[in-house]
Image: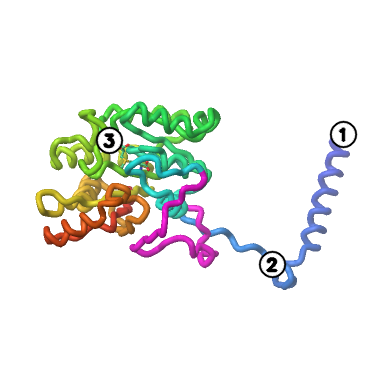
């Protein structure tokens, strides 16, 4: 009796489903019915390529000019040697998706982490100086420090640091990071500390390159395949000649396995505090020494293929 009743219910269900399908007219017969086109994205970005004209704020050429530093939304210019947040804004929108983990191996004042939170990404930051790591920690809430931002006080060039990063990735339930930022000291231009592991305190540019390459290798190993990395750096003058730190560090990135995707030149307005009132003196030195005053730095973009 029960089975018979069940059969009737099933047959009735099938009939109703048929009637309903017949009632729904196909789209061709309903020109008023517009079906939203599928979102078209790359695996490493949320940019909807079907609406690519809506992204006019995203830079696609190799000259980046910013009138001034963005000092809003948690950012400030208190750390000598920090990069301007607009760099992170551009790179994150192009090369990360919401929820992705950005790994910054030279965190400094935490620009990468602050912008990660602002843009609903997450961040693991490594910084050598304990006091600096604590300052950055104080910029985030207890909750953010559990779920979205992980700070590690360690030497980015040491192999053992990879285990520390892996432990944080495990907590954040991700096998690897989805974007890598390297903004190392520009050799000894600004000395960040007296520590022997500090890339700004290497004693020679050769040693700086050696340690930078070790950090780049760590970054490569911790990054997901197919994802992107950015190297932010400038050149320096020494003994009357240019030391091309940018090109040389980019070469190290390629040696560890990265494919180079872009060389972007960015104006230095907003982060040249060092010159300040001595600008005229620099002009004299340039005229006297046969060189030019730096007004640019680089953002190299790479992919792990
Ligand atoms: C150019 S600053 C980075 C600034 C940062 N992007 C910001 O916006 O604040 C370089 C940072 O690397 C740190 N550093 C130097 N050697 C390091 C190492 N071996 N491991 C980790 N951090 C290091 C310095 O203390 C300094 O804070």
From the image, tell me which residue sits under label 3.
Answer: 192
Distance from the alpha carbon under mark 1 to that under mark 2: 45 Å
Question: Looking at mark 3, is its residue's CB closer than 8 Å to ligand 1?
Answer: yes
Residue 136 place in picture, x, y as percent: 43, 33
From the image, tell me which residue sits under label 2.
Answer: 34
Asked whether, in this view, residue 132 is left or right of residue 144, the answer is: left
- Mark 1 or mark 3: which is in front? 3
Q: Residues within 10 Å of mark 3 (few under 14, many from 20)?
A: some
Distance from the alpha carbon under mark 2 to that under mark 3: 58 Å
Q: Secondary structure at mark 2?
A: loop
Residue 138 appears anywhere in the view: yes
In-front residue for pair 244/256: 244
For image coordinates 16% across by 51% down, the residue present is 237
Asked whether, in this view, residue 268 is left or right of residue 71, the answer is: left
For image coordinates 21% across by 53% down, the residue present is 247
Asked if the magenta segment contains residue 176, the reply would be: no
Range shown magenta: 45-73
Q: Secondary structure at mark 3?
A: loop
Q: Residues within 10 Å of mark 1 (few under 14, many from 20)?
A: few
């Amino acid at each position: 009796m029960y089975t018979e009743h069940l059969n009737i219910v099933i047959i009735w269900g099938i009939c109703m489903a048929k009637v309903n399908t017949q009632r729904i007219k196909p789209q061709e017969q309903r020109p008023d019915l517009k079906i939203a086109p599928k979102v078209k994205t790359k695996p490493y970005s949320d940019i909807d390529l079907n609406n690519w004209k809506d992204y006019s704020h995203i830079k696609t050429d190799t000259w980046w000019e910013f009138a001034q530093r963005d000092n809003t939304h948690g950012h400030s210019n208190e750390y000598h040697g920090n990069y301007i947040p607009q760099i992170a804004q551009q790179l994150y929108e192009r090369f990360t998706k919401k929820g992705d983990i950005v790994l910054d191996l030279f965190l400094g004042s935490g620009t990468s982490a602050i912008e990660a939170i602002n843009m609903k990404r997450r961040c693991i930051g490594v910084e050598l100086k304990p006091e600096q790591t604590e300052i950055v920690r104080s910029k985030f809430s207890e909750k953010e420090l559990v779920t979205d931002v992980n700070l590690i006080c360690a030497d980015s060039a040491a192999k053992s640091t990879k285990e520390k990063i892996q432990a944080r990735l495990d907590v954040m339930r991700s096998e690897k990071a989805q974007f890598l930022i390297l903004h190392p000291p520009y050799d000894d231009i600004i000395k960040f500390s007296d520590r022997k592991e500090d890339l700004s305190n290497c004693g020679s540019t050769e040693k700086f390159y050696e340690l930078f390459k070790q950090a780049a290798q760590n970054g490569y190993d911790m990054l997901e395949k197919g994802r992107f990395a950015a190297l932010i750096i400038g050149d320096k003058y020494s003994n009357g000649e240019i030391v091309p730190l940018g090109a040389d560090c980019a070469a190290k990135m390629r040696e560890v396995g990265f494919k180079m995707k872009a060389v972007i030149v960015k104006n230095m307005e907003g982060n040249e505090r060092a010159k300040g009132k001595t600008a005229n003196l620099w002009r004299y030195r340039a005229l006297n020494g046969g060189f030019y005053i730096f007004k640019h730095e680089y953002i190299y973009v790479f992919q792990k293929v």
